[in-house]
Amino acid sequence: MVTNQSYRTVSFMRPAPMSGMNMLTVKPVWAEAISSWDEWLRAAGKSAETRYTRTYHLRRLAHDHPDVHPWQMTDGHVVTWMANHEWKAETRRSYRSSLRVFFRWAQARGHITVDPSHELPPVPIPRARPRPAPNDIVEDALDTVDPRVKLMLLVLVFTGIRRGECSRLHTNQIERDLYGWQLRVIGKGGHERIIPIDDALAATLRLLPPGWFFPGQINGHLSASYVGKLVSRAMADGWTAHNLRHRYASLAYSVERDIRATQELLGHASVTTTQIYTFVPEESLRRAAAGANLGLARHAA
């Protein structure tokens, strides 16, 4: 039964260490719905990072619709809300996915009969060239940051892992096998992968006290967003942790030209995704183009 929730609100705080708190105020009926959905996500084995992202998306929707009951949302509400935000394609796709999952859950639970997110159009992701962080940017950052951020940079540069994977690193993930030192990384969906690391990085990591690499207030460690913020702040001109991932992917691919090996290192489910991350060197493109014109170049003179 839908009741009036006009007078009471519940405040959610989005952690943003060292920069205050971003307050999102939502009505209790929205808070209850989102909490129940979060419990379902947890039962489905979704990671804390995934649950945080999904529920934050819904809290933003709830915050912007204080006078609309969650089970009275229409496709008009949802489509207009999505249309009114100037998001990048990846962000828009992520929000669309969160809304689709939430309202499908609500429909399956019998809260609604019609899914208001059903009419949301798919979000195509434009093909873009990878943007690997250049060496001078990385070196300048390594020379100027404090020890904690330097360790973040070193880990990201030498492993290419995601910022969320970096934020959750624990000393029990440092391992050694017949071939040398490695990191056992817990990726998206809880999938594990092994990333070889050199002896110098291994020696640095083994000096850490037992526990999380980067202790914090999110289940004992820093949040992915805060790691990303610290890394972006350390590098100039808008370079980010994701650009370090592009850098690792491009350099790893350039050594062996083995896209499958690069895919495994990055933890991608699809080679297609890996291809987006790998920068093909200019000289390779020129050699390929020259080969395509073999024997006919004189006619262009």
Image (cartoon, rainbow, N blue to C red):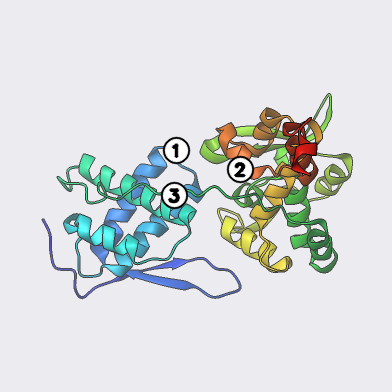
- From the top left corner, tell me how far across and down residue 269 is, in percent: 55, 33
Please give the label number shown on residue 173.
none
**Label 3: which residue?**
51
Would residue 40 be visible to someone looking at this image?
Answer: yes
- From the top left corner, tell me how far across and down residue 241 is, in percent: 66, 56
Where, by quadrant of the figure, is residue 266 drawn?
A: top right
Q: Amino acid at mark 3?
A: Arg
Does 85 appear above or below 34? below
Question: Is tag 1's residue or tag 2's residue first in the polypeptide sequence?
Answer: 1
Q: Where the C terminus falls, by quadrant? A: top right
Where, by quadrant of the figure, is residue 255 drawn?
A: top right
- Of the pair 113 and 210, the residue shown nearer to us: 113
Numbered circles on residues, count: 3
Q: Is residue 127 left or right of residue 295?
A: left
Q: Amino acid at mark 1?
A: Gly
Q: Amino acid at mark 2?
A: Ile
Tell me the element at label 1.
loop
**Label 1: which residue?**
45
- From the top left corner, tell me how far across and down residue 116 is, in percent: 22, 51
Q: Is residue 218 left or right of residue 60?
A: right
Question: Is tag 3's residue or tag 1's residue first in the polypeptide sequence?
Answer: 1
Distance from the alpha carbon under mark 1 to that under mark 2: 28 Å
Please give the label number shown on residue 276.
2
Q: Where the N terminus falls, by quadrant? A: bottom left
Few, some or many residues within 10 Å of mark 2 (<14, 14–19, 20+): some
- Of the pair 124 and 197, the residue shown nearer to us: 124
Would residue 70 be visible to someone looking at this image?
Answer: no
